[in-house]
Image (spheres, rainbow, N blue to C red):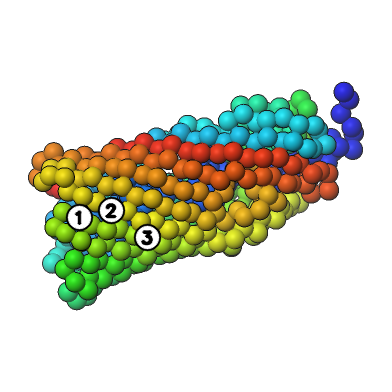
Amino acid sequence: MPFPRYLSHALRVTGVVSAAMALASPSAFAGGFDIHEQSTVFMGSASAGSAAGGSLGSMFWNPAATGQFPGFNTESSYTLVLPYGDIDIKNSPLGTGRSGNIGIDATTSDSYGAYQFAPDLWLGMAITSPFGLATKPENINYPGSYLGVTSKLLTINANPTIAYRVAPGITIGAGVQIEWAQGKLQFRDSPGTVAQFGGTDWAFGGTAGITLQPTSTTTIGVGYRSQMTHDLDGTFHSDVLTAGTVVPAVGTIDLPDIVTASLRQEMTPTTRLLGTVQWSNWSRFKDLTLTTPGGSLKTEANWDDGWFFSVGGEYDYSPSLTLRSGVAYELSPIDSATKRLVQIPDNNRVWLSFGASYKWSEAMTIDIAYSHMFIEDGGVDLYTPTGIGPFQGDVEAAVDLFSVGLRTKW
């Protein structure tokens, strides 16, 4: 079947716009494209209690949480992400077809350290990956490939922090975010060619938080991570659009503010109730822009804010073994088929998590956790910028996560 000339041109234009869209595509399918898995301990509770301390990894959400740990402490976590997502295009100008699994198995890790310099003063450092991972369809020739094929985003975030106990039961904290990002993608720009964009950027932001202990059995934590914008500076190459030459290009990604509020309540000497509410300002993610010497191309996103609610608990089975579990419900910022990109099959989801910690010695604790995300089925209903379409279909997705961590008191 010959490829219509006018349709070929329209889809080539779409490919460039999708290049910007694909920069923000995770394989973890978190709300939007942030990564919740920042601590094995809190993955085991579905992030319940994450900003209220109990583990040094709490400093990702709330830098004031370091004030709970005397001396010099470290924590590291390593998580295996096994995502699944399938796009079934049922109606499009190019016919029908399925993507196969677009998820790419990936790993993510984080490390934390904090030192008590004085009775009321702590300095800390967190190295994390707050956003990213990757997607690629098994069937790169399905109709949705003109809206995006390979998409990757890697972020590495250094977050030095300081915490100060201003009064008994009240600790405040603040920090600086120094984040490096790398985006790389490929997309189909004609039946026989694939274009590619790649770029890197540095961005800077802040963190702040407070922990309150109104009683000896209650801890409340509130933390803030600031918005950042990455202008990924790189190159774009297309046999069709740039005549096979490499041209400079910039892809822009607006990342959200995040506010997390958590509760850690001791019910008995061996049992603790945990809870978290988190808001992510994804509504600032208005559009995706790719700028080349030939001009700028913009695709509207107009996402809503994201919300995350979780409840969980911890039980000390013995002095050496702690068990935990949690359940969470997440409201995705993508609330309609017209906003759901083929690279991000995101939707509302339920988290079910289990974890355990084994105290190997007074100085060392080993953590393990497992989570499964039940993601609601959704749909896509997309047009190219020139009005060609619709590309309509159904989306299925789910994720399994396995994590192991180590906590050390030096």
Is 45 left or right of 191, judged from the image as shown? Answer: left
Please tell me whether mark 1 sits on a helix, a strand or a loop. Answer: strand
Q: Rounded to the nearest whole Å, what is the CA distance between mark 3 and mark 1?
A: 17 Å
Which mark is first along the chain, 1 or 2? Answer: 1
| Mark 1, other Cα within 10 Å: few <14 / some 14–19 / many ≥20 | some
Q: Residue at x 63, y 40 (%)?
A: 395
Q: Quadrant of residue 166?
A: bottom left
Residue 33 makes an appearance in the image: yes
Where residue 73 appears, x then y in whole percent? Answer: 19, 51
Residue 187 makes an appearance in the image: no
Which mark is first along the chain, 1 or 3? Answer: 1
Q: Is residue 209 above or below residue 380?
A: below
Query: Cβ–Cβ below 8 Å for labels 3 and 1?
Result: no
Locate the N terminus by quadrant: top right
Please tell me whether mark 2 sits on a helix, a strand or a loop. Answer: strand
Q: Quadrant of residue 224?
A: bottom left
Q: Residue at x 43, y 47 (%)?
A: 351
Where residue 29 appears, x then y in whole percent? Answer: 52, 44
Q: Residue at x 79, y 37 (%)?
A: 92
| Mark 2, other Cα within 10 Å: few <14 / some 14–19 / many ≥20 | many
Residue farthest toward the bottom in the current orientation of the protein? 167
Q: Is residue 42 above or below residue 361?
A: below
Q: Is residue 237 above or below residue 69?
A: above
The disc placed on residue 276 is 3
Amino acid type, residue under disc 2 in the picture? Gly
From the viewer's perspective, is the residue at label 3 or at label 1 nearer?
1
Amino acid type, residue under disc 1 in the picture? Thr
Where residue 338 appears, x then y in whole percent? Answer: 70, 51
| Residue under numbered circle 2 | 313
Is 212 left or right of 261, judged from the image as shown? Answer: left
| Residue under numbered circle 1 | 271
**Along the line of sight, the residue nearer the viewer: 191 or 80:** 80
